[in-house]
Amino acid sequence: MAKVKASKKADPNKLFSGLSIDKVCMKVSVSIKDPLRKSMPDTDEAKKIQSDHKMSDNAVRVNINLLDKTTVKDYRDPIKELRETYTENTLPVASGKQNYRLVSIKHLSKLRKDLNDAEKAVKDGVIKFMRYYGTPEFVAEQQSRLGDKYSEDLFKEKELLQKEMKSIVSIKIEPFATEDAVTSAGVYLNPEDVASIQKSMDSQNQQIRDYANQTLWTDIMKSVQEISDVCSKEHGSGKGSIFRNTMIPKVKQLLDTIPALNFDGDQNLEKVRGKCEELLKDVDNDTLREDPKKRKEVADGSSDILADIKSYRPAHATA
């Protein structure tokens, strides 16, 4: 069946104007596929435990940890840092697992560099690990760790693993819609179909924007709430009174990234961010641990900010 040509060629610049998200954001995806087997189920040991203790079938699961964390830290530590770089500088488009996240175009160059640097660190770590993998020292270490459970079959051949490790990380940065797709739609779709696509993409655009905005409000609220809860108690006085070393640095990092992720230019969100920044300007974990007066000041200030958040936060961000 022949395609219906539009009576009037659509302007490619206006066809998907409802999806204005493409003018401020790019799609970013980071895929990590670690081919190294982490553990192996030991069904014989599980059955023995069940029999010895008169337990029912499948009541026990036993796994053999094939490699110690220190053995794989050369490349798995950089993988953790790569994931953190990805998630801390982008926003999700919906709840649950998604194929991509959002990055602001104005923040794209920095993120691309940071991701490339992180990927290089992973590759360097893989090279270092593979130099050790399969060596007599490596085998001796695993024999010592696993004892009678050790078997060569538990570990992949070095050449195969080396080949699989070459594609351990995949980073993609893409626009929302390609020029070809826009042009094709403008040429081959009739005006009714174009209008339908426009409506659908308008809705999708708004959902993406709302969820991104909701995520920022949720993140900053949780961070301020944690600070408020901890600072309202005497340090070390009980549950929830300990200052984690990562607490203040994590909050400050969030405050630094919000401007690049505030796609809608939410002024209320920026007001809250500014108040948080001012409150924590000269604050670190040690100060809060050692200075009760400063701790009370931060507790009072964070409570005020939480009240602002409840007042400012838009309806779509209260879910």
Image (cartoon, grey):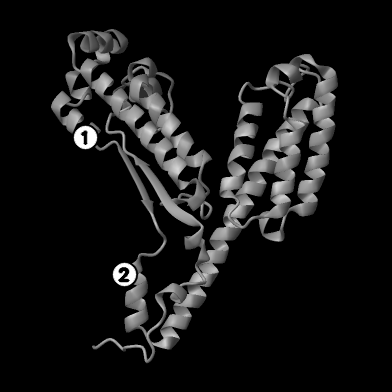
Q: Is residue 156 above or below residue 83?
A: above
Mark 2 residue element: helix
Closer to the camera, 138 or 92?
A: 92
Mark 1 residue element: helix
Left or right, 300 with respect to 90, comes to right
Closer to the camera, 96 or 53?
A: 96
Q: Residue at x 60, y 34 (%)?
A: 253
Give coordinates of residue 193: x percent, y percent: 42, 83
Q: Quadrant of residue 61?
A: top left
The residue to which callout 2 is attached is 180
The residue to which callout 1 is attached is 164
Left or right, 44 with respect to 210, comes to left
Give coordinates of residue 81: x percent, y percent: 44, 30
Q: Is residue 51 above or below residue 219?
A: above
Give coordinates of residue 251: x percent, y percent: 64, 33
The C terminus appears in which quarter of the rendering?
Answer: bottom right
Task: For residue 318, say whether it is visible.
Answer: no
